Amino acid sequence: QSALTQPASVSGSPGQSITISCTGTSSDVGSNNLVSWYQQHPGKAPKFIIYEVNKRPSGVSNRFSGSKSGNTASLTISGLQAEDEGDYYCCSYGGSRNIYVFGTGTKVTVL
Amino acid sequence: EVQLVESGGGLVQPGGSLRLSCAASGFTFSTYSMNWVRQAPGKGLEWISYISSVISTIYYADSVKGRFTISRDNAKNSLYLQMNSLRDEDTAVYYCAREGNVWLDPWGQGTLVTVSS
C-alpha cells in the first residue's frame, strides 16, 4: 500500500496558522475516521498529537487541530511557535492488510 | 511513567541476522498490543509489524514478510523483532510503539540497524 501524500515542507511566521494536508484514497483516509498525526523533532522519537481525525490526547496543545474531507485529512497548527518546528506525519489505520499507513512527512519551518 | 526502551541494533552484513528487543515499563504490558515501526535515514516512517496482547494475531508489512518475526514475552515485559536475511534497504532506526487502539503511543527512543558490507 502506498504512503499517503503530504507536502514536503510548510513554513510560517510565529503566531500564524499553517495547515498540512494528507491525501490518501477511498481505501484508507476516505474509508474511516481513523487518522492520527505525529510530531517528530530532529533525532527524537515521534510524538502522538491527534487521533481519530480531530481528537487531541491529554497534554497536547489546543493549537493543534485536525479535520478531514473525503480522502484528505489536514492538520492545522495555530499560533505557530518556534517549538513547533519539526517533521509531521499523518497515519491511516488500514486494518489487517497493512495496519498503519504513514504519510510521506512534512517539514515545518518557523520563519 | 510509561517507557519503552529498544536495544539490539548495530552493524550487520547483508544476509545476516539481528534480534531487537523492546523493554516496557510503567504499564501492564500483557494487556497491550505492540508494533514495530522503522525509519530509514532521512526518510519517513514505515510500519512493519504488529502483535496482539495475547499473541493470537500477528501482521507484517509486505516489505519484511517472511524475513522478520515479531514475538513477545509478557512475563518479561518485552517485545522482540527477529530480523533475518537483512538487506541494505533494512538500514533504519527501529522503534517499538504501544498500540493505543488505532494509534501508536508512546514510542521508544529507537535503535539503529545498519546493514552494510
Image: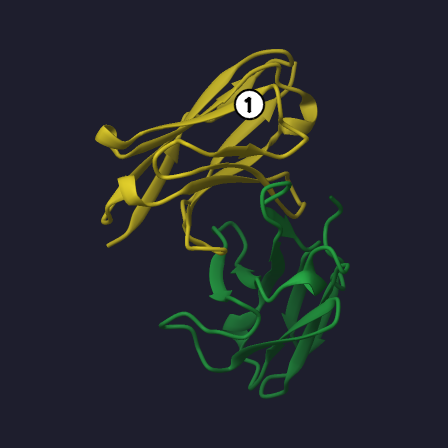
Residue A47 horizontal side relative to residue A111, left or right: left
Q: Residue at x 57, y 11 (%)?
A: B16
Residue A108 location, quadrant: bottom right
Instruction: Say whether residue A80 is left or right of residue B4.
Output: right
For mark 1, what is the residue?
B68
Chain B as rendered: colour: yellow
Q: Indicate left or right for B53 with A18 as reference.
A: left
Residue at the spot 39% in from the left edge and 43% down from the top edge: B33
Q: Which residue is nearer to you in this view: B52 or B105?
A: B52
Task: Identify which residue is drawn at 75% across, 59% down.
Answer: A24
Badge 1: chain ID: B
- Residue B87, position as x, y percentages in the image: 67, 20
Drawn colour of chain A?
Answer: green
Considering the image in quadrants, where does the N terminus of chain B appear?
Answer: bottom left
Q: Position of residue B86 (x, y in %)?
A: 62, 18
Against B109, residue A53 (above or below) is below
